[in-house]
Image (cartoon, rainbow, N blue to C red):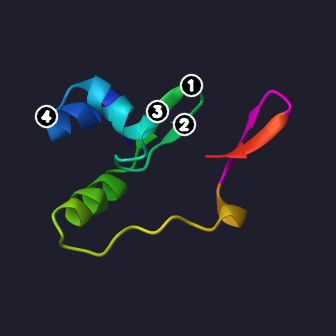
Amino acid sequence: LLAADDLANHLNVPVATIYAWRYRHEGPPGFRVGRYLRFRRSDVELWIAERLGEVGPIEDPPASVRPQRRFGSKTDTL
């Protein structure tokens, strides 16, 4: 697993860019482990290949299989 700073170093971009991409849903898929953001190396490589046109677009899983996160009294999908 890669931390946000590891991914930033790998892609040669500022860490702020990683968080901005995540906020805009543009970057590689990541997930939280406790309070830490992590990225699977395989997801990052697939995201890069998609950006280069080497593979088709990554499809989002159906809402029924997406992990859920609780915000206050509401439950939202990630």
Query: Is residue 64 one of those drawn in magenta?
Result: no
Report the front residue among 56 and 37: 56
* Residue under numbered circle 2: 32
Q: CA distance from mark 3 to mark 2?
A: 5 Å
Identified by mark 1, the residue type is Arg
Disc 3 + disc 4, Cβ < 8 Å: no
Q: Which region is colored magenta?
A: 67-73
Asked which secondary structure carries label 3, the reply is strand
Q: CA distance from mark 3 to mark 4?
A: 18 Å
On the picture, is 23 further left or further right than 67?
Answer: left
* Residue under numbered circle 4: 12
Disc 3 + disc 2, Cβ < 8 Å: yes
* Residue under numbered circle 3: 37
Disc 1 + disc 2, Cβ < 8 Å: yes
Q: CA distance from mark 3 to mark 1?
A: 7 Å
* Among numbered discs 3 and 4, the one appearing first in the sequence: 4
* Residue under numbered circle 1: 35
Residue appearing at x 46%, y 33% in the figure: 37
Q: Residue furthest right?
A: 73
Q: Residue furthest front?
A: 24
* Among numbered discs 1 and 4, the one appearing first in the sequence: 4
Identified by mark 3, the residue type is Leu
The picture places residue 67, in percent across and down from the top left corner, at 66, 52
